Image: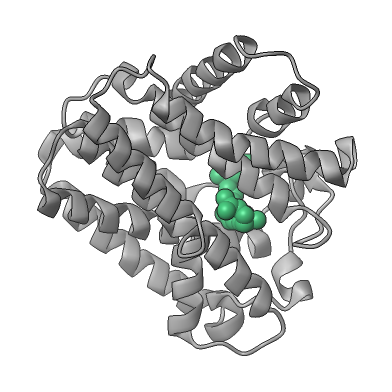
Amino acid sequence: MQKNSFNINANKTDNFIKKYLNQQKKTFLIHPMKYGVLSGGKKIRSSVIINTGKMFNLNTSKLIALCAAVECIHSYSLIHDDLPCMDNDNIRRGKPSAHIKFGESTAVLAGNSLLTLAFEIIADKKYKIDNKSKIELIKSLALCSGHSGIAGGQQLDLSFEKKRKSFKEILDMQRKKTGKLFNFCCYSAGVIAKRNNRIKRELSSLGEDIGLLFQLADDFLDVKGSKKIIGKPIKKDKKKGKSTLINLIGYKKAEIFANKLKTDILRRLFKHGKKANNLIKTVEFIINRNF
Ligand code: GRG
């Protein structure tokens, strides 16, 4: 199922973003923004949102604006992550990174514009959900993206380079850098489904664990993946002295930890019965993927 259903979700998100940008004023930054967000990428976060929504019988049309917003923020983080002052990577999604293609200043500005576009999309009156939910979503997305979320996690990641960090410190950094945006993916479906605070907290924690599993899989791919299939260089973590579980406890033990995390995530999903089937398949994909 997975590749097809992911592609369907990815296309829906891409089409939404394309249409949204095409309706805006034609500025210089539109092209580099499109390059950053529309040129490839699995759009796995969109599938997590859509498949969490399925647990609450939500139609994709109610969620597609959220998918677009999340993918804008994700692409923004990748553009900035590749910059010379961050991870300094020249290839992304099998193509030149945005700063190689357009220059550093344009890449920074296109990234910034994708960040603000995310909030514009959710706040837009064309997104027909009630204002209370909109404010809740905007606040949560801001928290997940800022200094206690992705940006904070990235700062920790860079500051941990070539240092021996503890298991707890590495997981905390990875939860922020990657887990928080997945936290928002599951939580936001709960907001649209009008679930109570307890359920929304459970969804946040579930999403964050899915995000952590995704990051662990990313670390495994850096060791055993194929550059051609992944579309970015491999074996960078060791070279850069990145603090990963693999570099701390070794590949085998990190794999055992990831499998335990996956079992725990699936146990929580099985409680939802058949309605969780698509999200379960997404989690299986996340840990077994080769790209
Ligand atoms: C505040 C949003 C924000 C960013 C600034 C640069 C930065 C701070 C954060 C970087 C965070 C980062 C790059 C995390 C890595 C997450 C990760 C595993 C990315 C790869 O995601 P995939 O595989 O990529 O989903 P595709 O190409 O499929 O979209």
Q: Is residue 281 visible?
A: no
**Relative horizontal placement of residue 93, taking residue 286 as reference (left or right):** right
From the top left corner, tell me how far across and down residue 48 is, in percent: 37, 39
From the top left corner, tell me how far across and down residue 54 is, in percent: 23, 29
The quarter in which the N terminus is drawn is top left
Image quarter for residue 41? top right
Q: Nearer the viewer, residue 61 or 2?
A: 61
Image quarter for residue 179? bottom left
Q: Nearer the viewer, residue 239 or 13?
A: 13
Establish if 259 lies above or below 42.
below
From the top left corner, tell me how far across and down residue 32 is, in percent: 77, 29
**Relative horizontal placement of residue 289, taking residue 92 as reference (left or right):** left
Image quarter for residue 220? bottom right
From the top left corner, tell me how far across and down residue 146 is, in percent: 50, 57
Q: Nearer the viewer, residue 242 or 155?
A: 155
**Relative horizontal placement of residue 51, taking residue 148 as reference (left or right):** left
Establish if 39 lies above or below 217.
above
For the point 56% across and 43% down, the residue is 74
For the point 43% across and 61% down, the residue is 212
For the point 56% across and 11% down, the residue is 19
Establish if 198 lies above or below 32.
below
The quarter in which the C terminus is drawn is top right
For the point 51% across and 63% down, the residue is 147
Count of numbered marks: 0
Q: Is residue 108 visible?
A: yes
